[in-house]
Image: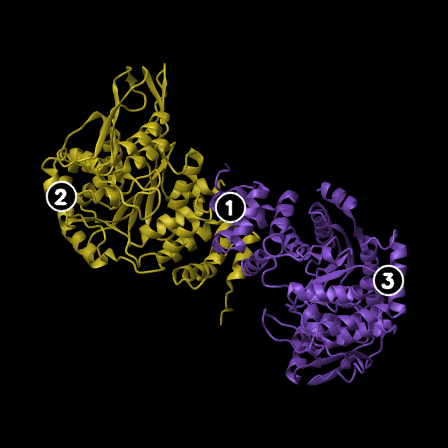
Chain colours: A purple, B yellow
């Protein structure tokens, strides 16, 4: 018979820099999920973990225990390989609306459980809900039915999925224990892996609009997530991608959906080119890991074709319709955009756009009404910012820089102030930053982590 | 106008090894006392403080904020200097019943707010309550009235005194954040200083029966408490004293009171000699700090006289009576001892008593029924252990080593096992350990702490 575990002993062990065993971590996670361990004990353990760090084995045990803490989705009945994409969050990051239908068009199942806007970042669910009628809160049975019909479905977490994360995440938020790679990794992966994925593509943002601004921190998180997910039995790659400017030409809700719709119907506006390129690459990896192409180059070609030949668009519209969305908004996306207030910001000097503090721009977007400061607040589907110039562009004074759409003039006043403070002009062109940096697969992730 | 404080920011600051300002610490302490800050945030702050350490300024601010978190006792109306003694806790530690009446007999007021038995240590209040009728839960008005009449009073904490400590101590107990010098210092001193003391004598135990077993840890705590209490305006000394064997010849409840009664009435049993010597020294320091003797040697002589001439005994009996105690038990203390079970333990080998693991002996005492494992449990006033031999004694096999008194034979079985495991015999006499080690006053405490 195993000896009974006592929470205070586990806290003490972690406090004294020990590593908890999988059984000990399962005990804490089950206690969080069942709410049988008081929050004050969980937060002491979280702070000790934050300060002393979690070992790779602890992170894996934590991820698996959280993944298994509630109900899970089982995609095996779909008869397809289930692959998802997850981004660590940024500004204007809307690749989900492209990669899900592209990968599905290439024969992969994409059971995507997404999140909401918070702070400076937007949320996939809020953006989708700008389509009248679109339902994100599906039961697992409805989720499976949409997946069977369309190959892709984008929904919100059910209340019974990964209950341990719900408790621990809220706790971390108000005990200053959020920004820890091990805890972030377990939180992200447990939710993703509870969808029963065979493979996962991670888009780890780096730069001024990312949660982790420093490249080395982003690299560590990327390698940790790949090693952890692989150890938990899911094939995984992570791409380090640029978040030193917003992705694409829009940040908001409906305007982001509309930008993706343009790409899906074959338009190629210059300001959306980074979004298109990143989406093709991410979808390519999903297709490759989904065993639909032996090489990544080949997989990217398939992704490109699905965009060009309209098969991704067809799946996107089918999915929206299956989840209750009113497709008539796509008859004239511009006419469907009905912001309460709008304002064009013109360049206040001439020069190159040398830097865009993307977190500040994210807060400007939030202030238009498109985002929320606290969980539970409503968002304005029509608010947001359209960018007319990208980092490195040469701009003349008076030229339009951005169009702000907001809930009211007061919202736009705040957003304008934040936006202006985020832009820096220069007489010289800034150095180019590659859109996609390091790519981690199981092997190089393990080598990276072993280096310490 | 000062900017509003947010708990999560203060946790983050401490997490990142910052030092909180007095205002920030007051905010947390007030939040603990008013229960307006959730326990999970307090425990995250406690764990961050445990792991990153508190600065001297933080410890002082914490002590003062906790002291001031509820109602306080004001002894200024007594017309005497108020001096107390506090011990960090051990086994058979009963000096309070001697030093309080001795110091009071020498003209000092002794407003003593004491605690209860927990784990391996006994509690002054539980011991006093073995006197039928003795009330420890006095209001502050009753406390003052007993002090006015007797010069000394030993009571329990009122519910309104130092409410922040009640919350934080319970929290530390189940979040593995107890054993930290700064937190221990603030918890002890806040409760003592809330009695409005002019001076304080600290008895810091070191050795196998102390909470801090290592001499360097005890020295650090002693120096920290002296520097902190002095900075908070209370003259303070700390004596490092031996807890590598029980103090005196008894550990329990009534048997400890009876041992002190014997010393107060002039008896000098050999096995109580360490208790008597330590009490005279501690009371001497109380008298010295109470300005009743210019030199410590002179103060100790006054203390000795108060024991010999019966004036301390008179005050002790007056105090017991004033707090409702039935003095008839002192007519025949042995007859008043009515344990449910008893057993004499004989030496199972011949040799010197080389070591007594005093914490284990403390647990043996607890198992007789004299102590409690969890707060709130009842204690048996008649249970405990009488020691017939001290460390260093030469013992022949079959000679009585100790007499165990317990709530039942089953209690004695457990206590016997623990007691036997705690005793180590040897063919050679162990080195003598001085009863009183280093003494810290303000000056050498500050020098000690400045050395790092």
Residue B97 drawn above or below residue B170:
above
Label 3 sits on a secondary structure element that is: helix
Residue located beneath label 2 in the image: B317
Query: Which quarter of the picture shows residue A109?
Result: bottom right
Name the chain under label 2: B
Q: Nearer the viewer, residue A75 or A421?
A: A75
Q: Position of residue A429 (x, y in %)?
A: 85, 66
Is residue B18 in sight in this rendering? no
**B407 above or below A414?**
above
In-front residue for pair B261/A233: A233
- Locate residue B93, reporting x and y percent: 28, 37
Q: How many residues crowd around disc 1 within 10 Å: few (fewer than 14), some, or many (20 or more)?
A: many
Name the residue that disc number 3 marks. A303
Q: CA distance from mark 3 to mark 2?
A: 94 Å
Query: Mark 1 or mark 3, which is nearer to you?
Result: 3
| Marks 1 & 3, CB-CB < 8 Å contact | no
Left or right placement of residue B241 versus residue A390 in this view? left
According to the image, label 1 marks what residue? A11
Between discs 1 and 3, the one toward the N terminus: 1
Residue at x-position 55% and y-position 44%: A24
Nearer the observer: mark 3 or 2; the answer is: 3
Q: Which mark is residue A196?
A: none
1 and 3 marks on the same chain: yes
Q: Position of residue A140 (x, y in %)?
A: 65, 63
Q: Position of residue B62 (x, y in %)?
A: 42, 54
Count of labels in the image: 3
Element at badge 2?
helix
Q: What chain does badge 1 belong to?
A: A
- Which of labels 1 and 2 is toward the front? 1
Question: Residue at 84% of width from left, 67% of height from top?
Answer: A276
């Amino acid at each position: 018979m195993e000896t009974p575990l006592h929470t205070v002993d586990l806290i003490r062990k972690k406090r004294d820099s020990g590593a908890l065993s999988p059984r000990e971590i399962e005990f804490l996670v089950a206690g969080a999920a069942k709410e049988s361990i008081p929050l004050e004990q969980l937060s002491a353990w979280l702070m000790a973990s934050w300060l002393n760090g979690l070992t790779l084995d602890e992170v894996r045990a934590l991820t698996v225990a959280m993944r298994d803490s509630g109900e899970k989705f089982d995609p095996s009945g779909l008869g397809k390989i289930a692959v998802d994409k997850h981004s660590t969050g940024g500004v204007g990051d809307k690749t989900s609306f492209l990669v899900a239908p592209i990968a599905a068009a290439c024969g992969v199942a994409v059971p995507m459980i997404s999140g909401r806007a918070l702070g400076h970042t937007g949320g996939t669910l809020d953006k989708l809900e700008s389509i009248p009628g679109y339902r994100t809160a599906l039961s697992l049975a409805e989720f499976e039915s949409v997946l069977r019909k369309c190959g892709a479905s984008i929904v919100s977490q059910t209340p019974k999925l990964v209950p341990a994360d719900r408790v621990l995440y809220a706790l971390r938020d108000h005990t200053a224990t959020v920004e820890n790679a091990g805890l972030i990794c377990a939180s992200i992966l447990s939710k993703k892996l509870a969808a029963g994925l065979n493979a996962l593509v991670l888009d780890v943002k780096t730069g001024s609009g990312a949660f982790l601004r420093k490249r080395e921190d982003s690299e560590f998180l990327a390698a940790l997530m790949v090693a952890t997910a692989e150890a938990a039995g899911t094939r995984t790659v992570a791409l380090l991608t640029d978040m030193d400017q917003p992705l694409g030409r829009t940040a908001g809700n409906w305007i982001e959906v509309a930008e993706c719709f343009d790409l899906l119907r074959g338009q190629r506006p210059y300001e959306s080119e980074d979004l298109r390129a990143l989406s093709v690459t991410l979808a390519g990896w999903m297709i490759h890991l989904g065993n639909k192409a032996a090489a990544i180059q080949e997989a990217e070609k398939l992704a490109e074709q699905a965009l060009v030949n309209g098969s991704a668009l067809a799946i996107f519209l089918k999915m929206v319709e299956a989840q209750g969305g009113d497709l008539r908004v796509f008859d004239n996306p511009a006419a469907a955009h009905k912001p309460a207030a709008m304002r064009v910001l013109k360049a206040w000097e001439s020069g190159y756009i040398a830097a865009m503090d993307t977190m500040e721009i994210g807060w400007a977007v939030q202030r238009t009404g498109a985002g929320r400061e606290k969980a539970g607040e409503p968002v304005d589907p029509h608010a947001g910012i359209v960018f007319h110039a990208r980092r490195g562009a040469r701009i003349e004074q008076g030229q339009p820089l951005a169009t702000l759409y907001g809930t009211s003039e007061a919202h736009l006043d705040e957003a304008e102030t934040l936006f202006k403070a985020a832009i820096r002009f220069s007489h010289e062109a800034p150095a180019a930053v590659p859109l996609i940096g390091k790519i981690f697969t199981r092997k190089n992730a393990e080598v990276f982590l072993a280096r310490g």
